[in-house]
Amino acid sequence: MKLPLFGRYTFFALCVLLTFLSLPFLSTIGWLWPLTLVAAALSLLGIFDLLQRRHAVRRNYPILGNIRYLVESIRPEIRQYLIESDNEQLPFSRAQRSLVYARAKNQTADTPFGTLKDVNHTGFEFISHSMLPVVHGNPDEFRVTVGGPQCRQPYSASVLNISAMSFGSLSANAISALNKGAQLGNFAHDTGEGSISPYHLEHGGDLIWELGSGYFGCRDDNGAFDAERFAVQARRPQVKMIEIKLSQGAKPGHGGILPKHKISAEIAATRGIPQDRDCISPARHTTFSTPIELLQFIQHLRELAEGKPVGFKLCLGHPWEFMAIAKAMLETGIVPDFIVVDGKEGGTGAAPLEFTNHLGVPLREGLMFVHNTLVGVGLRDQIRIGASGKIISAFDIASVLAIGADWVNSARGFMFAIGCIQSRTCHTNRCPTGVATQDPLRQRALVVPDKAERVYHFHRNTMIALAEMLAAAGLSHPAQLEPHFLVHRLSATEVKLYSQMHAFLEPGALLKGEVQGEFYRRMWSMARSDSFEPAAPVAVS
């Protein structure tokens, strides 16, 4: 028993002993001063370790026990820079980040000596190319018109836009750089649910105003929706579309929180909230509780916005709930102009681990279900579909356009473009690059003109890469992509086209009852236009 005890306290005892033994010689041996001061400081630390009650390791191993917490604090950086491989995705690989950095800096992103991916690994995907490649199309024309028959001010959107990130979650300089980049590249910047800040407006970039459950920017003193305040904001010429956020990929069904230590006076004024408490976004909206009421709210917003496109964003959950919205569209005749499908793999902010890992449908499955449902009820041609969730490369864009999306949004890709290094400290207010912080000194490091150029170049160079990829497949525009262009490896000996792997409904199939596959038939029978509750208990197989 004595040897382990001696081993635990040896270094502490040596520090104390050195401190006291050196004291008599300090007046005659000058070089002892630094050594004595270090030993004394470590001795005081050891005494504190013995007296504190929070950390058992430090009580049992005074001084030395602190090494454990020091190493733990720099573990993410050591792993990211020294240990992880180029293709290890946590959540984005070094290769993915390097691609964005190169394109944002307008440098070549070409790689030598072949792919680093294992092309025989299950899950590997590729787009099939043509024996007759074409001259690649003009990236400036890779746009889609958003606005159905009930919309009076349709918007021509780029196929790649900035996904929802709020002022408050991101710094003022980050928002300003993103919007300036969007203005330079003629693409859209989603405000996130934190409302429209002065930094969204100063450079004139196109805005998609996201309206969350907190109704920030258009709420009354009790936090309820205020139609007059909404109309003032929605009628700004810079606001091109309005997006109701039903749920988001990182934490669907959870709501959100902006800690009070990140709420500045500007944020409080932008959102219309008090500054002395955490800002809570409820998990659900208060303006509607049924599919029909949701569509009526959409119609109301469209009227207040003078006919601008209005739609909603969701991470797919219960399938019958989305089909309930589709049934309500048929019953009311009210059709949203667009739907953005967010995948569970998306998310720029902090979320409980269980939500991040185990709640929500991944992007591709959610996208195909939404696309199929709209096709099945004969409304797909009236409603545009956006997609968001871990999209940064031209292949990422092409792969979701091939299975039903009309355009994509990227959040973390554009964060990398303005300097994010994936330190994963977004929720601490200590972002090392000034992207996700409200600390004035930290965000000062983010120089807006320089980062705006990088946002522009990342978008431009990614669109050029998409044009080149499409040309190799024999296509001149993203709208020509179909499921049979996307190939997925099922095993070491088998690959399949997406058109072979998944069921794609025929137009009007749900209305005609001509649905192949039990899943879609069962979900459709459970959906109710008057409620999000299922019409019958979910069958247990």
Image (tube, helix red, strand yellow):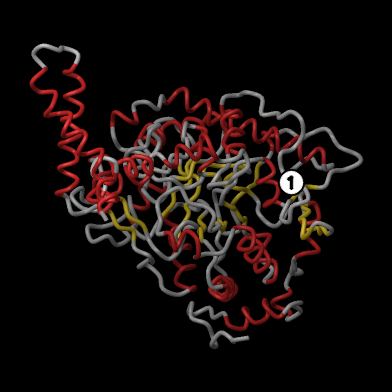
Q: Where is residue 518 in the image (x, y as percent from the top left)?
A: 71, 80
Residue closer to the observer: 288 or 193 = 193
| Residue that lies at the very extreme toward the right in this rendered image | 131
At horizontal 80% and vertical 58% (from top left) the residue drawn is 497
Quarter of the image with the C terminus is bottom right
Check the image and report above or below for 176 versus 157: above
Check the image and report above or below for 313 versus 517: above
Residue 246 seen anywhere in this rendered image of the structure: no
Secondary structure beneath disc 1?
A: loop
Q: Position of residue 343 (x, y in %)?
A: 56, 57
Residue type at the position of mark 1: Asp
Q: Position of residue 536 (x, y in %)?
A: 55, 88
* Residue where numbered disc 1 is placed: 118
Numbered-mark total: 1
Residue closer to the observer: 262 or 511 = 262
* Relative side of 411 to 143, left or right: left
Residue closer to the observer: 364 or 226 = 364
Q: Where is residue 522 in the image (x, y as percent from the top left)?
A: 64, 82
Q: In which quarter of the image is residue 508?
A: bottom right
Quarter of the image with the N terminus is bottom left
At horizontal 37% and vertical 47% (from top left) the residue drawn is 195
* Relative side of 286 to 299, left or right: left
Q: In which quarter of the image is residue 504?
A: bottom right
At horizontal 40% and vertical 36% (from top left) the residue drawn is 435
* Relative side of 338 to 120, left or right: left
* Relative side of 477 to 384, left or right: right
Neighbour tally class for label 1: few under 14, some 14-19, many 20 plus, Cα within 10 Å: few
Residue 49 seen anywhere in this rendered image of the structure: yes
